[in-house]
Amino acid sequence: MNLSKLESILKGRSSQPHQLIEVLQDVQESYRYIPEEAMREISKTLGVPLIEVYRVASFYKAFRLKPSGKYVITICNGTACHVRGAQLLLDQATSQLGIKPGEVTDDRMFSIEHVNCLGACALGPIASENGSYHHHMTPAKLRKFIESIRREEKKEVKHAQAGYERRPGDYAEAVSTRQKEEK
């Protein structure tokens, strides 16, 4: 585990137990989960017992204690999404990626989550990717969406190998292209 990110997050927060949730959020944003080693350091720095850090991190569904993929595909299974085909979306994601909810692909690129509600019932079924909602999703749209992420990742790898630097707007173009492909 690269501790420099953690040190940066904890800098200036010594003996500030009231910042526990904010620190956990920052750690998860940096590492895509909350490593056990990070919880130990958080405990020492904030002056919070380790068991309390673990209790808070494990209580809130938003925190992950296991590594997740770079892209977390979340399928809503709330009542509105369920009756509109959420299970078909979950079946598509699991068969296409070869993993079950809570697992990570071997290349650490994707994770699948299955949640009770994403709070956008009128737009269901909903799938989200790293918090970006995609409404009225179908298995075919989800398949194309996952394929487009893989294509973009391959481009990024090729560009990195060629020494290409990202320009402002590159990501926005990729998202726009993905959204067009979904339709």
Image (tube, helix red, strand yellow):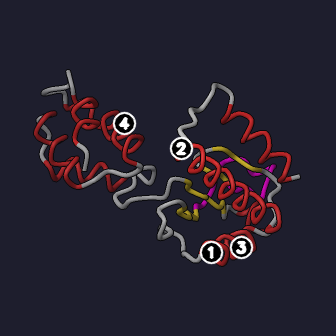
Q: Quadrant of residue 97?
A: bottom right
Alpha carbons under labels 4 and 1: distance apart:
29 Å
Answer few, some or many: residues within 10 Å of disc 1's Cα (few below 14, many 20 plus, some between 14 and 19): some
Instruction: Identify which amino acid the numbered label 2 is placed on.
Output: Ala
Residue 127 in the image: above or below residue 95: above
Q: Which residue is mark 4?
A: 26
Answer few, some or many: residues within 10 Å of disc 2's Cα (few below 14, many 20 plus, some between 14 and 19): few
Q: Position of residue 35 (x, y in %)?
A: 27, 53
Are the residues flagged by discs 3 and 1 in contact, CB closer than 8 Å? yes
Q: Quadrant of residue 6?
A: top left
Q: Which residue is mark 1?
A: 94
Instruction: Identify which amino acid the numbered label 1 is placed on.
Output: Thr
Q: Position of residue 157 (x, y in %)?
A: 56, 50
Alpha carbons under labels 3 and 1: distance apart:
6 Å
**Which mark lies nearer to you, 2 or 3?**
2
Q: Residue drawn 78% across and 51% down?
A: 135
Residue 125 is one of the magenta-drawn residues: yes
| Residue at disc 4, secondary structure | helix
Q: Residue drawn 66% across and 70% down?
A: 93
| Mark with earlier residue (2, 3) | 3
Residue 127 in the image: above or below residue 180: below
Alpha carbons under labels 4 and 2: distance apart:
27 Å
Disc number placed over residue 92 in the picture, else none: 3
Disc number placed over residue 160 in the picture, else none: 2
Q: Residue drawn 67% across and 48% down?
A: 119
